[in-house]
Image (cartoon, rainbow, N blue to C red):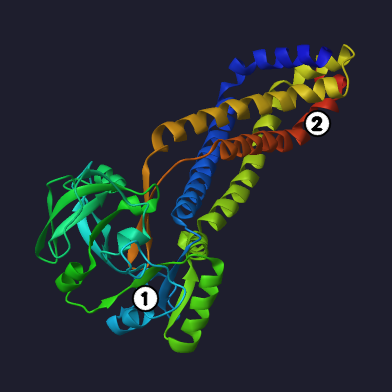
Amino acid sequence: MNWIRLTVIALQGIPQRLGSTFVLFIGIAGFIGILVGVAGMSQSLSATFNAASNYNRALVLAKGALYEGSSYLSREQIAQLYQAPGISRTENGQVAASPELLGTVNVRLSDDDVLSGVVVRGIASSGFAVRPEIELSEGRWATPGLFELLVGRRTREQFAELDLGDEVLIRNTTWRVVGIYETGDFHEGEVIADAETLMSVYEQNYYNSALVHLDSEADFEALGNWIEENARTVELVHEPEYYRSLSEGVSGLRTIALSTGFIMALGGVFCVLGVMYSTVEARHNEIAIQKALGFRGAMLFMPIVAEAVLIAAIAAATAIGAVVAVFQGGFVTIGLDAASVTYEFAVQPDTLLVCVLVALGVAVVGAIVPAVQAARLSPSDALRTL
């Protein structure tokens, strides 16, 4: 086809237009790199929250509290909860409820001397039955009543001095790491301690939340109704719903991803528009001669669009490769109320495909007007400048 031959001729002239080509390449690569990064963070955060959700569990929080860190439950409230209907029982007959306490400890990062906060989650002995996803991978379980810690896999990888046998100070008390655990979700970015021992160190007499296990949806309704009638200072939140709201609220990542994508896509269109206008101007005489030789319409329109699409495809592939190579599998920490969430950055193939299509779409939209100008170029005007 003639337009293919003309496209090849146009692409062969790129070395003479390296300046404008480089501007377009950098513009598209930067735009796609940021878009992949923000979209990957949002997607990874949602995925790790979904992984932590269990449809047979619910959280009991203080009335009006949005997060665990802003909730406070007294021992009396916990004792009252143990009398509520709908909560299942563990194998040894205990109420399947885990009153939990959140704290923080500053630990040095693995790659430098900067201190960063790590969430310390105090869990009651019954908590491991309520959270069966907590699996010990190394070491041993912590002994209740002792200053012993279990460290999540991701926490050990991210922070120094949190390996088996290491000691860490929490409120001037020395705690020893005795085990490494895995959960397959963001809780691997935490440290687990005995709730009662942690409360004594913090010199406080309240919990932040209680996680309960339920056998069915009917049990959730029964417990919720009981709480409304007998314990109006607390409220029940289904665990999937809690994490769904958490993923939507943390730093507004989804909103940031969409707004960033729109703004940068618009900027990308103008970048392509300007560069391809420059390309048409540089090829002014060449295009005029082709038109004088009888080439018309799409045969002159398509090479301009094809050049923009090719550069955009190469730039997008380069940006995606760089982001994946540098950040894939790394850890992202986001502050949340009195705690923080650490999760693994893992951008999915469908997100990468969407980003590539966005880059190609931006290239096509931005190249249309310059391509139309090339197709309408008057050969007589150009030939007079030869």
Q: Is residue 275 left or right of residue 181?
A: right
- Check disc 1: other Cα within 10 Å, few if <14, some if 14-19, many if 20+: many
Q: Is residue 367 left or right of residue 383?
A: left
Closer-to-camera residue (375/33): 33
Residue 230 in the image: state x and y as whole percent.
45, 88
**Quarter-of-image position of residue 139:** top left
Disc 2: which residue:
373
Residue 351 in the image: state x and y as whole percent.
57, 40
**Cα separation between marks 2 and 1:** 63 Å
Residue 374 in the image: state x and y as whole percent.
80, 26
For the point 21% across and 78% down, the residue is 204
Disc 1: which residue:
71
**Quarter-of-image position of residue 205:** bottom left
**Secondary structure under the numbered disc 2 in the rendered image:** helix
Residue extending farthest to the front is 92
In the displayed structure, 31 sits above or below 114; it is above
In the displayed structure, 364 sits above or below 11; it is below
